[in-house]
Image: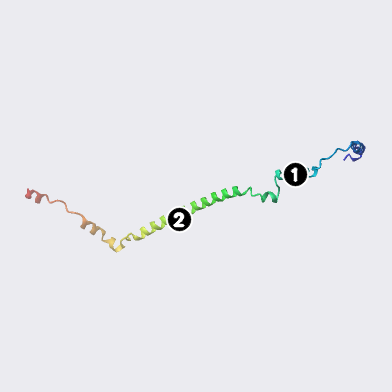
């Protein structure tokens, strides 16, 4: 630092300032100074923990919480709907009659033939005309 070079200049500035005549000060000077300090302090944004206590973050947190809650509610609703549909389909499947046993399927060809209608008897039809 340049402390040694500035000492003569500082001494000369001090002498000039002492030579200036004193100005009269207003009677309410102290009150005005304190009011100005209070105004500047109020206008200055708080820092650190004081800023945290001003609750400027509260609206943002409220909106974010609302969005998160709506997303979770939608997810829960869709999950429950899917589970309900799945349970209904399971119930419908269990109500359907089970497949026939293998013993019944052995005679399937004979049963199929019984359900077929015989072809029309042409000779009988000709006689009836």
Residue 85 in the image, given as x and y percentages of width and height: 41, 55
Residue 80: image tag? 2
**Mark 2 Cα-neighbour bin, 10 Å: few <14, some 14–19, many ≥20:** few
Compare residues 73 and 53 and report the one nearer the observer.
Answer: 53
Identify the residue at horizontal 48%, vertical 54% (top origin): 76
Quarter of the figure that contains the N terminus:
top right
**Mark 1 Cα-neighbour bin, 10 Å: few <14, some 14–19, many ≥20:** few
Colouring used for the render? rainbow
Q: Is residue 69 above or below residue 12?
A: below
Q: CA distance from mark 1 to mark 2?
A: 63 Å
Compare residues 129 and 52 and report the one nearer the observer.
Answer: 52
Identify the residue at horizontal 39%, vertical 58% (top origin): 90
Compare residues 43 and 34 and report the one nearer the observer.
Answer: 34
Q: Is residue 65 left or right of residue 37?
A: left
Residue 115: image tag? none
Q: In the rendered picture of this protein, how many numbered marks are placed on residues?
A: 2
Residue 100 in the image, given as x and y percentages of width and height: 30, 61
Residue 109 in the image, given as x and y percentages of width and height: 25, 58
Whichever of labels 1 and 2 marks the residue nearer the N terminus, that label is: 1
Residue 119 in the image, given as x and y percentages of width and height: 16, 51
Q: Is residue 75 above or below residue 27?
A: below
Q: Is residue 52 left or right of residue 114?
A: right
The picture quadrant where one finds residue 18 is top right
Mark 1 touches mark 2? (CB < 8 Å): no
At mark 1, the secondary structure is: helix
The residue labelled by disc 1 is 35
Q: Is residue 37 left or right of residue 91?
A: right
At mark 2, the secondary structure is: helix
Identify the residue at horizontal 41%, vertical 58% (top origin): 87
Identify the residue at horizontal 58%, vertical 50% (top origin): 62
| 1 vs 2, front mark | 1
């Amino acid at each position: 630092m340049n402390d040694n070079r500035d000492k003569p200049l500082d001494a000369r500035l001090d002498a000039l300032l002492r030579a200036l005549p004193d100005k009269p000060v207003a009677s309410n000077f102290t009150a005005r100074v304190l009011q100005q300090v209070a105004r500047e302090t109020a206008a200055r944004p708080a820092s650190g923990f004081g800023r945290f206590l001003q609750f400027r973050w509260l609206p943002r947190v409220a909106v974010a919480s609302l969005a998160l809650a709506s997303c979770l509610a939608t997810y829960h609703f869709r999950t429950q709907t899917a589970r309900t549909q799945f349970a209904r389909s399971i119930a419908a499947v269990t109500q359907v009659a089970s497949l026939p046993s293998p013993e019944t399927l052995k005679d399937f060809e004979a049963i199929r033939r019984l359900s077929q209608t015989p072809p029309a008897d042409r000779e009988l039809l000709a006689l009836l005309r």
